[in-house]
Image (cartoon, helix red, strand yellow):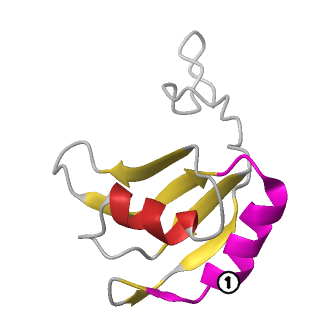
C-alpha cells in the first residue's frame, strides 16, 4: 500500500521516516519529495508497505503523531490525477482573430 505523509519537518530524513513505519511491519520504499531548485524537502513524502493490514495499522497510529517535533498527517495515498492540459494557446484562434 502506498501511504502519503505530510507536514514533515524539513530536516526529517528518509531513514527517520522508514524507522517510524518499520515499527508496524516491512517497508518497501520511502521517498521524501525534494524541491528540484533548492534541494530542500517539500515537507511531504510517500511510504510503500507490502502488507495492507500493517499499513493500515501504521496509518491509524501515526496520523496526528509527532515526528521530529512536527505533528504529521498520514493517510492512504490517492492515485495522481491525469492532467491532459498542455498549456499554450490563450483562448484565441489566431486564424480569424476570434476568441
Which quadrant is home to the C terminus?
top right
Overall secondary structure of the magenta section:
helix
Above or below 16: residue 92? above
Identity of the residue drawn at 58% across and 51% down: 27
- Location of residue 66 in the rendering, given as x and y in whole percent from the top left corner: 46, 89
Above or below 73: residue 31? above
In front of the other: 3 or 98: 3
- Location of residue 89 in the rendering, given as x and y in whole percent from the top left corner: 52, 25
Q: Which residues are magenta?
A: 49-66
In front of the other: 83 or 13: 13
Above or below 83: residue 25? below
Mark 1: few/some/many CA within 10 Å (<14, 14-19, 20+): few
Q: Secondary structure at mark 1?
A: helix
In the displayed structure, does residue 11 sit left or right of residue 43?
Answer: left
Query: Which quadrant of the view contains residue 47?
Result: bottom right
Q: Which residue is mark 1?
A: 61
Amino acid at each position: 500500500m502506498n501511504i502519503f505523509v505530510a507536514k514533515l519537518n524539513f530536516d526529517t530524513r528518509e531513514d527517520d521516516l522508514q524507522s517510524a513505519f518499520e515499527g508496524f511491519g516491512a517497508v518497501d520504499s520511502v521517498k521524501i519529495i525534494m524541491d528540484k531548485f533548492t534541494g530542500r524537502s517539500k515537507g511531504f513524502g510517500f511510504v510503500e508497505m507490502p502488507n495492507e493490514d500493517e499499513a493500515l495499522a501504521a496509518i491509524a497510529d501515526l496520523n496526528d503523531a509527532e515526528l521530529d517535533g512536527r505533528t504529521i498527517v498520514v493517510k492512504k495515498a490517492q492515485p495522481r490525477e491525469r492532467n491532459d492540459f498542455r498549456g499554450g494557446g490563450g483562448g484565441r484562434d489566431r486564424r480569424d482573430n476570434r476568441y
